[in-house]
Image (cartoon, rainbow, N blue to C red):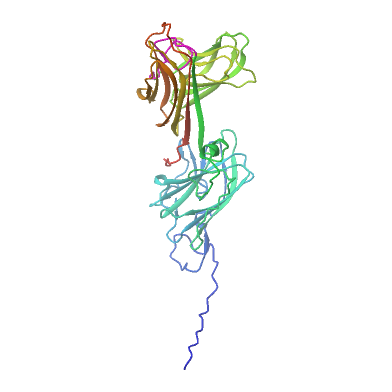
């Protein structure tokens, strides 16, 4: 019986011919594995001034709040990925003085101005960064943002393309994680809220607001210790002042809220006891006060409008922070009001009602919660899951039928828990 001899074919060595063919050429390319981006400067360095954006592959192109400083955003503004399946980014920020925000863009056209941002990752100063990105569309590019207002960002790196590398994004459990970065995680023992609190998830911030009412002082009052209801639909920004009921209160107080241009405004004012301390900025709403010097307020601290002396926020004795149930969503965020909890006692005659309002653009109030318990102890824990955009606000109010009744209501306390998500799905304009 004849035997069949099999002679295996000779497999040629793979060719490593990086940077031989330009990215847009039609040269023979079946042999290479990885390829640098010489047409756009695959190896790059960048020196970004404060609060600006650089596009390292388009050397010399800087984006500022007023727009692009060059006209390079044309057909060569993005990398053609037709022959590749992996994009490799290697970025060295070990000598950097600031954190960098890496934004990765894709488009079906070679136009970065109309590209869609798919990934955002924070690269801390002193960090070596390396990551593989998949091909989401035909064209690719990325930007690096310097968010520091006082330091320049200096870094270098390399961008390479690959046809054959298997895609994988290793992530250690100790890595700081951005929700839009790539990674497969199995973390049974961890919790999303804990990851936020210990800064593993960097583009989400957990915050809260508390309200305290020792006694009902008005038929309708903001959830605070003051017999008044603030007008949250006023679009007028005004100068402010604050004072304390105790002359011993000499301390720095950080004031935050919504400024005249509907963006977050904050300033530190030195409180000098019962004397009026005047601020430099104007505010529409003040949603938080916090003692920043190492003392605790001995008296009740209030902040007022200069125009009509309207109370804008209250800090109770010894609290060290605002005790008013008021929150302003920061611009460029999506804030989710996750949870509301409060307790107290509502009487038979007074029938106090606790309400929570969402204020849209400082113009329109929307009732998002109301408690109608009567003649009973009130202990409520409610999952709200309400979305607030960057120009929305939230506040609590108490309405009571009879303030002077001997069957009046008792102490009330309330709290809202909020998650602030960075709005990272924007586009370059």
Residue 225 in the image: above or below residue 139? above
- In this picture, residue 359 sits left or right of residue 207: left
Q: Which residue lies furthest to the bottom in this view?
A: 1
Residue in the foreground of this view, choosing between 100 and 120: 120
Q: Does residue 45 appear anywhere in the picture?
A: yes
Q: Does residue 328 appear anywhere in the picture?
A: no
Q: Position of residue 149 (x, y in %)?
A: 56, 33
Q: Position of residue 68 (x, y in %)?
A: 46, 41
Residue drawn at point x = 50 percent, y = 51 percent: 184
Residue drawn at point x = 48 percent, y = 88 percent: 4
**Is residue 230 shown in magenta?**
yes
Residue 209 in the image: above or below residue 195? above
Residue 139 in the image: above or below residue 66? below
Residue in the foreground of this view, choosing between 103 and 406: 406
Q: Where is residue 415 in the image (x, y as percent from the top left)?
A: 48, 24
Q: Quadrant of residue 24?
A: bottom left
Count of numbered marks: 0
**Is residue 409 shown in magenta?**
no
- Magenta stretch secondary structure, dominant: loop
Residue 181 in the image: above or below residue 265? below
| Residue range (magenta) | 214-234
Residue drawn at point x = 52 percent, y = 76 percent: 11
Q: Position of residue 38 (x, y in %)?
A: 52, 57
């Amino acid at each position: 019986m004849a035997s069949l001899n099999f002679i295996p074919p000779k497999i040629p060595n793979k060719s490593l011919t990086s940077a031989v063919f330009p990215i847009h050429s039609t040269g023979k390319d079946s042999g290479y594995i990885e390829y640098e981006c010489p047409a756009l400067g695959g190896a790059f360095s960048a020196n970004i001034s404060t609060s600006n954006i650089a596009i390292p592959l388009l050397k010399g192109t800087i984006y500022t709040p007023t727009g692009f400083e060059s006209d390079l955003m044309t057909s060569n503004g993005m990398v053609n990925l037709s022959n590749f399946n992996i994009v490799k980014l290697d970025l060295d920020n070990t000598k950097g003085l600031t954190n960098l925000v890496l934004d990765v863009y894709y488009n079906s056209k070679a136009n970065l101005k109309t590209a869609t941002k798919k990934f955002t990752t924070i690269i801390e100063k002193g960090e070596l960064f390396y990551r593989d990105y998949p091909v989401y569309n035909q064209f690719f590019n990325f930007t690096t943002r310097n968010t520091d207002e006082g330091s320049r960002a200096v870094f270098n790196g390399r961008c390479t393309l690959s046809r054959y590398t298997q895609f994988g994004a290793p992530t250690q459990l100790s890595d700081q994680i951005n929700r839009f970065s790539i990674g497969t995680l199995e973390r049974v023992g961890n919790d999303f809220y804990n990851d936020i609190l210990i800064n593993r998830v960097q583009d989400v911030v957990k915050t809260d607001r508390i309200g305290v009412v020792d006694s009902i002082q008005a038929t309708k009052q903001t959830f605070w210790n003051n017999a008044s209801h603030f007008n949250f639909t006023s679009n007028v920004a005004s100068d402010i002042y604050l004072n304390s009921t105790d002359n011993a209160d000499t301390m720095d107080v950080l004031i935050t809220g919504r400024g005249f241009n509907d963006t977050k405004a904050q300033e530190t004012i030195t409180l000098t006891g019962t004397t009026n301390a005047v601020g430099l900025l104007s505010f529409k709403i003040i949603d938080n006060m916090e003692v920043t010097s190492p003392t605790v307020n001995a008296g009740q601290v209030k902040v007022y409008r200069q125009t009509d002396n309207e109370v804008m926020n209250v800090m109770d004795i010894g609290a060290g922070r605002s005790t008013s149930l008021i929150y302003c969503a920061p611009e460029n965020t999506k804030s989710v009001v996750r949870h509301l909890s409060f307790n107290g006692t509502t009487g038979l005659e007074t029938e106090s009602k606790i309400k929570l309002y969402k204020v849209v653009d400082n113009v329109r109030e929307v009732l998002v919660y109301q408690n109608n318990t009567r003649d009973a102890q009130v202990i409520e824990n409610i999952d709200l899951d309400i979305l607030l955009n960057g120009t929305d606000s939230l506040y609590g109010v108490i309405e009571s039928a009879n303030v002077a009744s001997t069957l009046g209501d008792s102490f009330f306390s309330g709290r809202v828990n909020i998650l602030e998500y960075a709005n990272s799905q924007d586009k370059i304009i």
